Image (cartoon, rainbow, N blue to C red):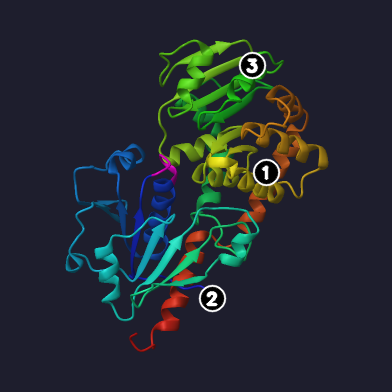
């Protein structure tokens, strides 16, 4: 059943851990709740300087400010007085961040208490469906937290997607793409050329991939927004001083450095390219909505436990691919994520070129499959409203 949040209040708490991933997801969610559901949303962020990179109008020195219909609050350690903040109707901990004790105490004074949700990281692993929606009662206070998992099946919470996202992409691809490249100061692509975006963590496999592109038979234009991978690209080029606006050619490869992109600008880059290298959660999800082939780099974790997440998404993403294309995809993703027995990037790239058409077709099909499911924002509102209505008439605990 579909509910509308109306003017219900939501508080979303976000700690900035993985550069822009955590705040990126939290901001998309906050904006979707405000724009699409009419909710009053406060987004509590512990590092507004990082948020400012994404939204330059944010002022890190302000305790509270309005941005695109969302109230952005500085989450500071001195939140000590429970009476100073009224807890919202729905409270979201993004990615398991720990709420301030004072705020939890404020939650406990409300009757009925807020719907408290721990928004987990996106994963395609099979155990996610069994844990989605499970309650966790507070050991001392009359509060219950629920675990909400984004995912790829109707047993999970879906993926973040604005209601007009696919229409905006279609408009861009059909009517705006020709003007896009000149707007970046980049020539229009020539026949047979690859346009590839690179957004990645530091990666030992990068040099062999750049070598393959440099010595290949087809022209490759690599578009690199300013970020963590740029120093490594610059080292390979032998050009340590590269910055936004520079273009450096090595053999068949041309590297073009782009300014740091806003979320909307990054979406357009994903829509425009033939292949997107992405990392973490937010850019991975956006690349899937782009309906373009992608290579994903999972957030590196100790003891390579991120390889389980990698293999789970690989299995789900490739299940309808032709066998040869599925093997190329698997080899490339695993090599890019440091799996030692995978073929080197030169072999992976050779296979990718041979399977270019099938991988492109599959990316469009995959997007359509995902679009048949509710978006995470809609699913989260439905979940919260169901919990609120089920407890509305309960006596105070």
Distance in Å between CA atoms under marks 1 and 2: 30 Å
Distance in Å between CA atoms under marks 3 and 1: 26 Å
Distance in Å between CA atoms under marks 3 and 2: 53 Å
Q: Where does the magenta region start and end?
A: 17-21
**Disc 3 versus disc 2: nearer the observer:** 3
In the drawing, what numbered circle is on residue 211?
Answer: 3
User: In the displayed image of the protein, which residue is found farthest to the right?
Assistant: 323
Dot 3 and dot 1 residues touching (CB under 8 Å): no
x%, y% of residue 15?
Answer: 36, 49
Seen in the picture, residue 133 relative to 326 is either above or below; the reply is below
Residue 241 magenta-highlighted: no
Q: Is residue 305 left or right of residue 141?
A: right
x%, y% of residue 191?
Answer: 68, 21
| Residue behind mark 2 | 1
Tag count: 3
Is residue 66 something that shows in the picture? Answer: yes
x%, y% of residue 173?
Answer: 57, 39
Instruction: Determine the image quadrant of residue 373.
Output: bottom right
Looking at marks 3 and 1 on the same chain, the residue that comes earlier in the sequence is marked by: 3
Q: Tell me the SS state at disc 1.
A: helix
Q: Tell me the SS state at disc 3.
A: helix
Q: Is residue 142 left or right of residue 187?
A: left
Seen from the viewer's position, the closer of residues 251 and 69 is 251
Q: Is residue 322 left or right of residue 153?
A: right
Q: Could you tell me which residue is drawn at 44 percent across and 74 percent down?
A: 385
In the drawing, what numbered circle is on residue 363?
Answer: 1
Please identify the dominant SS of the magenta region. loop
Seen in the picture, residue 350 relative to 301 is either above or below; the reply is above
């Amino acid at each position: 059943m579909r509910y509308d949040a109306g003017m219900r209040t939501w508080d979303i708490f976000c700690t900035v851990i993985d550069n822009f991933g955590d705040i990126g997801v939290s901001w998309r969610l906050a904006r979707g709740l405000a724009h699409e559901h009419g909710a009053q949303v406060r987004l509590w962020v512990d590092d507004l300087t990082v948020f400012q990179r994404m939204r330059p109008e944010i002022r890190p020195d302000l305790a509270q400010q309005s941005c695109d219909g969302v109230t952005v609050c500085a989450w500071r350690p001195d939140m000590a007085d429970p009476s100073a903040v009224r807890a919202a109707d729905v409270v979201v901990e993004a990615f398991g961040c720990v709420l301030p004790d004072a705020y939890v105490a404020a939650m406990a004074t409300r009757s009925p208490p807020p719907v408290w949700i721990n928004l987990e990281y996106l994963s395609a692993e099979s155990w996610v469906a069994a844990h989605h929606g499970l309650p966790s009662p507070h050991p001392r206070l009359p509060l219950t937290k629920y675990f909400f998992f984004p995912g790829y099946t109707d047993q999970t919470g879906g993926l973040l997607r604005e209601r007009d996202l696919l229409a905006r992409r279609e408009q861009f691809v059909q009517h705006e793409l020709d003007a896009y490249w000149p707007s970046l100061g980049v020539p229009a692509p020539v026949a047979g050329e690859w346009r590839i975006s690179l957004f990645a963590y530091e990666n030992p496999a990068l040099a062999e991939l750049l070598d393959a592109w440099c010595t290949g038979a087809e022209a490759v234009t690599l578009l690199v927004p300013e970020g963590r991978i740029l120093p490594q690209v610059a080292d390979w080029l032998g050009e340590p001083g590269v910055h936004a606006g520079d273009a450096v050619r090595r053999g068949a490869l041309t590297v073009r450095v782009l300014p740091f992109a806003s979320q909307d600008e990054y979406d357009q880059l994903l829509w425009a390219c033939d292949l997107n290298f992405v990392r973490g959660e937010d850019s991975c999800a956006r690349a899937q909505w782009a309906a373009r082939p992608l290579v994903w780099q999972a957030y590196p974790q100790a003891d390579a436990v991120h390889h389980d997440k990698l293999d789970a998404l690989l299995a789900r993403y490739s299940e309808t691919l032709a066998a040869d294309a599925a093997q190329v995809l698997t080899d490339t993703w695993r090599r890019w994520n440091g799996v030692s027995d995978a073929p080197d990037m030169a072999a992976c790239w050779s296979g990718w070129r041979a399977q270019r058409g099938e991988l492109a077709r599959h990316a469009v099909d995959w997007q359509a499959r995902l679009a048949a499911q509710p978006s995470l924002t809609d699913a989260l509102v439905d979940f919260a409203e169901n919990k609120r209505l089920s407890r509305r008439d309960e006596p105070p605990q």
